[in-house]
Image (cartoon, grey):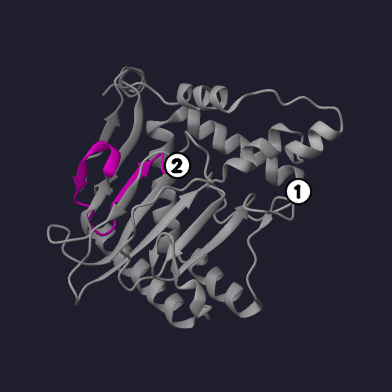
Amino acid sequence: MHRDPRPILDKNGRVFAVLAGRPKDTRGWTRVNAQVQAAFEQARARYKLDPKKKCHRRGDFPAVAAGISYGGGQKHVSNLAHDAHNQEVIEEPLREPAIQRVAGFANAAFALFAPRLYRYYKDTIGRLCGHNPSLKRNFSRGVFASATFNLGPQVITYVHTDHLNLPAGWCAITAVGDFDPEEGGHLLLWDLNLMIEFPPGALVLIPSVILRHSNTVVRPHERRFSFTQYSAGGLFRWVECGFKSQKAFEEEGGTYDVSGAERWLQGVRRWSTWEELRALRAW
């Protein structure tokens, strides 16, 4: 997986994941990857991590999240909070132009390969921030509510899914670092029996709630980080319930009678078929 994108289709021809690769400006994007790695290295050195949080269900490495979240016990939608020192540390990479370029590439690829799903994300975060101005996007034009900096120095994830994300939604994962992608750092999509070269600077978009995924080791002298962007499923339900929890909505007399199965089907219908995309883009 290098420059040319590769969509992954289901049996009905719907694009449900994309190996988006890297932009065509190979030399420029190599510099971007190096700049992103430098920002990650600096954040890793400065972030004061609770040692108990270094090892978690996704792997044995520091993982620092930023953005807008809801779920996992939160009573309200809010910005993810850190203490004053760590908040300053995590805001620096968010201001880094190279990381903003990586985020922008993910945004553009999302819009290109899943325009209906992209609009759903864009509309939801726009309504959230319009209703509550205290909510702060990670990137001014980004449609993903949250991001995680996986700070390595060797990000090797366990087999996992991201159960709090939007079920039929997409997670953007960008590999970062200095490693040989032919030797290690491969993306494993277990349910699809796929092992994919995942070079530094490359992007994948996958439904991380339903696809078990992990990555392979890199060599001892190499560095591998990753940058992920996603939106919690609870954010969409919060908006649809009138900017309140489903429980509060129903206690006030509202009716939220969309079953989990129907929500899943609604989500799948937001995926585009390859024929639709070819017609739109003249591929």
Can residue 72 be seen in this snapshot? yes
Element under disc 1: loop
* Residue 127 shown in magenta: no
Marker disc for residue 276 = none
The correct choice, above or below, for 269 with respect to 216 in the image is: above
| Lateral position of residue 184 relative to residue 128, left or right | left
Q: Quadrant of residue 78?
A: bottom right
What amino acid is labelled 1 in the image?
Answer: Asn
* In front of the other: 279 or 64: 64
The correct choice, above or below, for 165 with respect to 273 in the image is: below
Boundaries of the magenta span: 190-209
The residue that mark 2 highlights is 209
For this orientation, the residue located farthest to the left is: 182
Q: Quadrant of residue 157?
A: bottom left
The residue that mark 1 highlights is 132
For this orientation, the residue located farthest to the right is: 252
* Residue 191 shown in magenta: yes
Marks 2/1: CA distance? 27 Å
Residue visible at 70% across and 39% down in the picture: 238
Element under disc 2: loop
Residue visible at 54% across and 44% down in the picture: 143
| Lateral position of residue 239 relative to residue 58, left or right | right
Whether label 2 touches label 1, CB < 8 Å: no
